[in-house]
Amino acid sequence: MIIAIDGPSASGKGTLGRLLAFRYGFHYLDTGLLYRRVGQKLLCFGHSLTDESLALRAAQELDFVLPDDPALRSREMGNAASIVAAIPCVRAELNDFQRLFSLRKPGTVLDGRDIGTLICPDASVKLFVTASIKVRAFRRFQELREREEEVTQDVVLDDLERRDQCDAVRAVSPLRVAPGATVLDTTTADIDSVLDSAVCVVEAALALDGLRG
Ligand code: DC
């Protein structure tokens, strides 16, 4: 079974994805990390984030066993990821790995922006996790503060507005609710109730898969 989760930054999709993967014993992939790593490689070598051929090379040479590097979660890498993620050849280069990953047994959970629309359009479960921009900015602000990044809430809000806009209007794989996806709004819901709602969707899909044999 494939569980595809899409949604904007700091909507709670990563937390939900990890919890679902743990509950069902599935493999989990945070696809945003792939784009963050491409951005990190370019910045490390002092290259421009908009240099398409260097960005493609960074994607081609990506070490898919991603290091557990807290720097990848920084504000700088989030903004860098959003820029390289708009480059069509970078996205194309990363698609095969994500599709192959999605086929691992006994099942997978992938989260990102185009999982239900492009990477795994036939996923048995498609979720779109969202929340108001103010709530998302507050969550991201708290996360960054926990990592001791010096940042204000207004700066985080500006970042998210810019990234939302970039993710929504780019020519390739813009963020969209996939056909058939269940929308989960986490603005006021706590993680337990969001998980309960997601589990209902997964259980219904498992029952359907069982009927189909
Ligand atoms: O989910 P995140 O904040 O780690 O994502 C970082 C950036 O990468 C975000 O601006 C959108 C982009 N991204 C994407 O375009 N497609 C994905 N499947 C995952 C992330």
Image: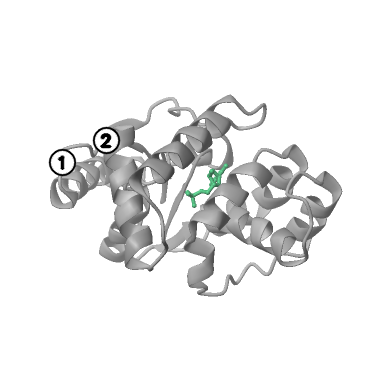
Residue depicted at 67% across the width and 26% down the height: 171
The amino acid type found where label 1 is placed reads: Ala
Q: Which residue is mark 2?
A: 184
Whole-percent x, y for residue 162 in the image: 52, 34
Whole-percent x, y for residue 131 in the image: 29, 35
Whole-percent x, y for residue 194 in the image: 20, 45
User: Left or right: where does residue 154 sit relative to residue 65?
Assistant: left
- For the rendered model, the colour scheme is one colour
Instruction: Please state which of residues 81 and 175 is positioned toward the viewer in this rendering.
Output: 81
Q: Which mark is residue 189?
A: 1
Mark closer to the chain start, 2 or 1: 2
Residue depicted at 76% across the width and 44% down the height: 50
The amino acid type found where label 2 is placed reads: Leu
User: Left or right: where does residue 59 sit relative to residue 193?
Assistant: right
Task: Give the Cα distance between marks 2 and 1.
Answer: 9 Å
Residue depicted at 19% across the width and 41% down the height: 197
